[in-house]
Amino acid sequence: MTASIHQATMAMSRLKPSGRIGDSMKKILGLVVSFVLIVLSCFYFFTRQPKNIFDEIYQETEKTYRTNNILRNIEGFEIDDVWPSDGDHFKYSPLGKYKTPPEDYLELRVGFNFEKAYSKLFVSFERKIADGTKLWMVNKYNPNTKTITKSIQIVISGNEDSYIEDEAQVKSYLEQYGITAKDLDSYYDEIVNQKVLKDWCSIYDSKYSPSNYGDVKIETQWENW
């Protein structure tokens, strides 16, 4: 019996340091886990920060479009009557337009798609170039790739509008009416920079500006025309 007690005592004495080591390991592991969580939180916060002015518009509108769309604060801008909506076709796609577009322009719209697979912000506008003929410029921003794509179509008015997308035909119409790539750049600047982005900066304390977009890639259909 004495021998058994002695053996048990020896076993317990051997366990005590092990227990202390175990407690230390738990503390170390706890610190490591806390550090990893902090790093992951910082990484998530950083990646979610808007990288450019279009990110700002997209993210802030995504936060508010179901309740009180932030774009309502822009003077003369109205949200489509169907909003807010739970309809399958409109649930993630709020749309609005300026009641009175700038002079020489027919329609100016700002819209979104908040479905993750189709994330988009777009600014589109029309400009009359002749009786029954309009130029339609569509500027799409993809928040996943941080890319804004600028493209144009020709719209022939009739009982139903006809849209011409073929690049050769579009260029032919532009040449016919004496519209150059430089003119297209000026139309973009007048509407996107001097109107939409300026209005955005008037209602939101932006880190960016119409002359400083931030980190964004720009693809222009007519760049080499």
Image: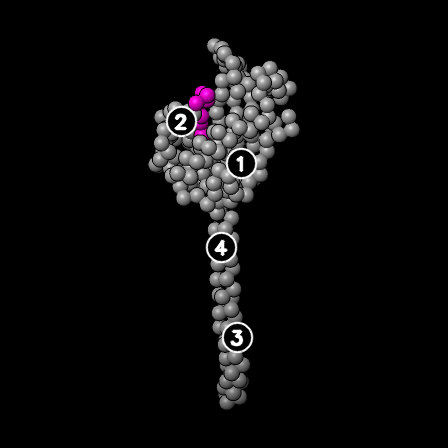
The residue beneath circle 2 is 98
Label 3: state its secondary structure: helix
**Camera-side mark, 1 or 2:** 2
Residue at 56% across / 37% down in the picture?
Answer: 147
Q: Which residue is mark 4?
A: 42
Q: Closer to the N terminus: mark 1 or mark 2? A: 2
Q: Amino acid at mark 2?
A: Tyr
Q: What percent of the width, then of the height, locates residue 60?
A: 42, 40
Give the amino acid at mark 1: Asn
Q: Nearer the viewer, mark 2 or mark 3?
A: 2
Q: Is residue 18 above or below residue 115?
A: below
Disc 1 residue crowd, few under 14, some 14–19, many 20+, Cα 10 Å: many
Q: Nearer the viewer, mark 1 or mark 3?
A: 1
Magenta run includes residue 201? no
User: From the image, which quarter does the C terminus lie in?
Assistant: top right
Q: Where 37 sits versus 193, above or below?
A: below
- Report how far apart the C-alphas of labels 1 and 3 lie in the structure: 53 Å
- Amino acid on which disc 3 is placed: Ile
Q: Is residue 75 left or right of residue 214?
A: left
Q: Is residue 223 above or below residue 63?
A: above
Evaluate if marks 1 and 4 touch, with contact meaning CB atoms under 8 Å apart: no
Q: Secondary structure at mark 2?
A: strand
Residue on which disc 1 sits: 142
| C-alpha gap between disc 2 and disc 3 | 69 Å
Residue most extreme to the bottom: 2
For the residues labelled 1 and 2, the Cα–Cα distance comes to 22 Å
The range drawn in magenta is 103-110
Q: Residue at x 50, y 73 (%)?
A: 24
Amino acid identity at mark 4 = Cys
x 54%, y 43%: residue: 215
Residue in view at x 46 percent, y 32 percent: 194
Question: Which label was assigned to residue 21?
Answer: 3
